[in-house]
Image: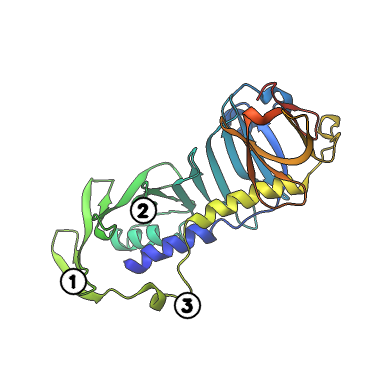
Amino acid sequence: MMQRLFYFLFAVNCCFPLDKVSYLQYFRTEKDFIAGTAMPKMERFSSDHMAVSYNEKELPVYKNWISGSGDTVKSELLSFDQDGALMGKSRIDSVGKITNVFRYGETEPWSLEFRTYYFSEKEILSFMGQESEFSLDKSGKIKEILFKTVNGIYYGSISFRYNHHGLLTQELWVSILDSRVVRRFELRHNLLKKSCKIWEYGKNGEQVSHVGLEMIPEERLYNRMPPQRGDILQELFVTMEELRLNRITFSGPEFIPIMEWDRLVLKSGEKIQVDYISSSKHGFLLRFIDESDILTIPRTQVESLTTRWGEILYPKGD
């Protein structure tokens, strides 16, 4: 059970390999995105819209919902296999925290173990394309996993409880089809003895096993430290960096840049070539040419900001 928790930490990082970003398109709504109806880029100012980044295979790898004021509302990072089938996605809130992770396919380990345990081998069932949704709490721990068939039928869930130290104390398996607890783990930790006792209960509430474990230090569990979920946020940043660095031009005339870089004019009158990243109510995130650090320039110091495409981001329409 503990190994499966560590597996999730690994899977969150490895199921979303970073795809090279080739170009960006804007859409008014999710419906327009599905229909492939892009909006003229100049119309996105002062209106809610989606910014979607595509890889070299023209698959959407990053979706960003942006408000009319230019702030990010939520985002999604998507991953595809070599055949272009969706493998998984992660949802990120407005402050950059991952709230949900989705994995697709019948071989996803948590769903596979749930089905192997609950369903009889005699039952002829297909779970091809099934979905496993991992919900994370504010501290980044898994609070629940939901399993759903490709037809949209929820068939099982696993929920987790933690103590005030953040240690797992209960793992509860529920069959959503008949609202019945089918498996339960209870954990008791002794921090002084650095040990943990685990009780397993079966479909009828009977005790199946009872084991005592030494709390093994992480450095003995791994050849290297276990991966952290924060790495995905780093991948998101690198994805957006790819978009900025590639400077992809399009065949249409409106996508031909008129300057090599974005142009920042300060209140002092100084004009600076910059690489504009994003904006918020506090200011503009950008990078100076030939520098790697991302800086935030307060709006109070900015006279104007114009993109290399000739769009006036500030003061007009930002």
Q: Residues within 10 Å of mark 2 (few under 14, many from 20)?
A: many
Element carrying mark 3: loop
Which residue was labeled with disc 3?
A: 223
Q: Disc 2 or 1, which lies upstream in sequence? A: 2
* Marks 2/1: CA–CA distance: 24 Å
Which residue was labeled with disc 2?
A: 142
Element carrying mark 1: strand
Residue at 59% in and 40% down: 63
Viewer-side residue, 171 vs 75: 75
Type of the residue with mark 3: Asn
Which residue was labeled with disc 1?
A: 209
* Coordinates of residue 267 in the picture (x, y in percent): 72, 28
Badge count: 3
For residue 179, which numbered disc appears in the image? none
* Coordinates of residue 241 in the picture (x, y in percent): 68, 49
* Marks 1/3: CA–CA distance: 30 Å
Residue at 56% in and 55% down: 16
State the quadrant of the N terminus: bottom left
Q: Disc 2 or 3, which lies upstream in sequence? A: 2
Is 307 located above or below residue 154 in the figure? above
- Residue 114 falls in image quadrant: bottom left
Q: Residues within 10 Å of mark 1 (few under 14, many from 20)?
A: few
Element carrying mark 2: strand
Type of the residue with mark 1: Ser
Q: Is residue 71 left or right of residue 190?
A: right
State the quadrant of the C terminus: top right
Residue 207 visible? The answer is: yes
